Image (spheres, helix red, strand yellow):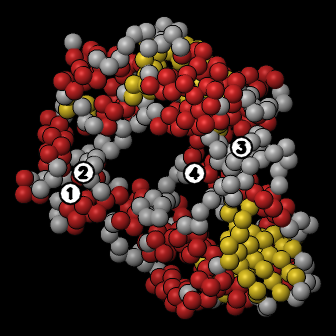
Amino acid sequence: MSNPLDLISKTAYLKFEQCQKAFFFYKRHPYLRDKVSIDKQLTFSRGHQVGDLAQTLFPGGTDVSKQTKNSADALALTKTLVENKTPVIYEATFTFNGALIMLDILCLENEKYTAYEVKSSFKISEIYLKDACLQYYVLKNALPNLEDLFLVTLNQDYIFENELNPKQLFKKRSVKAESEKNLPYFENQLFNAQLTLEQNKIPNIAIGAQCFKPYTCDYFGNCWKETVADNSIFHLPLLNKEKLFEWYNSGIRTIDQIGEEHDAKAIIYKIKEAYFENKPIIDKERITAFLATIQTPMAAMDMEMWGPAIPKINGTKPFEQLPYLVCFFDGNIHSNIFIDYTKDERKHFAEELIESTKTFKSILVYDGTMEKMVINNLAKLFPQLKPELEELKNKFIDVFDIFLDFSYYHPAFKTNFSLKTASSVLLEDIYYSKITSGLEAMAYYDQFRLETNPVEKDIIKEELINYCKTDTLATYRLTEFLQKLIK
């Protein structure tokens, strides 16, 4: 293609697969893109870390991305490296039929090329496979003597011991067979994608299930800005996207348009009434029964987990969730356990956790799924502590349940029942500072472990503890809020 701006990168192509409008925006109106969330940025960063480590499987390569500033330069340098029969190339760049790819690792052995695409996950998803098949299509047509292309993923059975072993950490799977079968498909799809650009007008595509699959679209805010009013049916919980779009496409756009003839669940009509009257749903009987299960003395508890894709502690696996911080609030005093993980300190954490909670008869949590998983894992690791850990788990009172089963529902929740949403709607004294999510806290913990300046290290630690403390305070205050309701 004559216009380099119309080269279709792998990212652009996958947007075309999801939605032609998103593809067109990506190529022609990138400024319309939604702001990238911090969590998504952190996910990208983790992927780069895993990709960099995978390069050590084939050391000594030339990194095209570090020696070029644009795709034209990258294509030229890759061409030179291939002509010179460079044994290993990182970020090798090729184009064919308007598609542009940058391959993680390309190796030449016995006059044949083997390509590797790295993913920071255990499983090969449909989107990963499609991604790799596109790369194979380009490579087969742009590179002589292509032998195979492998998807490289993390090995979920790998256990770190003293020193990282990349050959055991990663595993690979050939995608040659699938790719060969789909060569005509990509030929046709790239033709359609180029045609979309040549027509130079925004494709007339209505919102639909494609806005969410395989990922929430980067242009969601632009396409939905005039669709999702405060009383939109898309703010209704419990209903799947298929049902919502069935209603939407039949002309039902707002909650007040839902009638008895639409055969929705009984709770949907209660939620409709709550929206119409701007009043919460309150089931005092069920809330009273829930609160009756709480015994004093009680405390709210929240844990923060660290799950690095690349394991760093002996005896751990990729993405294994390690508890590094737990905070408590008993209504008066905040306390915490903080683990540095200079070594495997999980037993110490478990013992401290048992000691810190033994005087409480009830432990308030908010969506304690992760906490229960951690305790179950600790019980497996340290069978001698299992009775005490099971006793602790049996003390859990999950405040989340009241909101999840609609014993209390406020229209301002919409479809979000998270602790931060519930507390922002119902409470006045809950404020989060720098850290706003568990994934962000995990990134801060990574910084904490790498920081060498003791003053900076203490500042990061304090931020982490404040974040966790705020969660415990919110959980405790929500319980008090419910107690006031039934009085």
Q: In this figure, which residue is indicated by the disc labeled 1?
A: 253
Which element carries disc 2, helix, strand or loop? loop
Which element carries disc 1, helix, strand or loop? loop
Toward which corner of the image does residue 297 lie, by quadrant?
top left
Q: Residue 40 carries which label?
A: 4
Where does residue 88 sit, x and y in percent of width and height?
87, 74
Whether residue 51 is situated above or below residue 90 in the rendered picture: above
Give the CA distance from mark 1 to mark 4. 30 Å
Task: Tell me the kind of residue under disc 1.
Answer: Arg
Toward which corner of the image does residue 53 lie, by quadrant?
bottom right
Disc 3 or 1, which lies upstream in sequence? 1
Give the CA distance from mark 3 to mark 2. 46 Å
The answer to which of 315 and 308 lies nearer the viewer is: 315
Q: Which of marks 3 and 1 is in front?
A: 3
The answer to which of 313 and 476 lies nearer the viewer is: 313
Residue 321 visible in the shown view: yes
Q: In this figure, which residue is indicated by the disc labeled 3?
A: 316
Disc 2 or 4, which lies upstream in sequence? 4
Q: Residue 388 carries which label?
A: none
Q: In this figure, which residue is indicated by the disc labeled 2?
A: 232
Disc 1 or 4, which lies upstream in sequence? 4
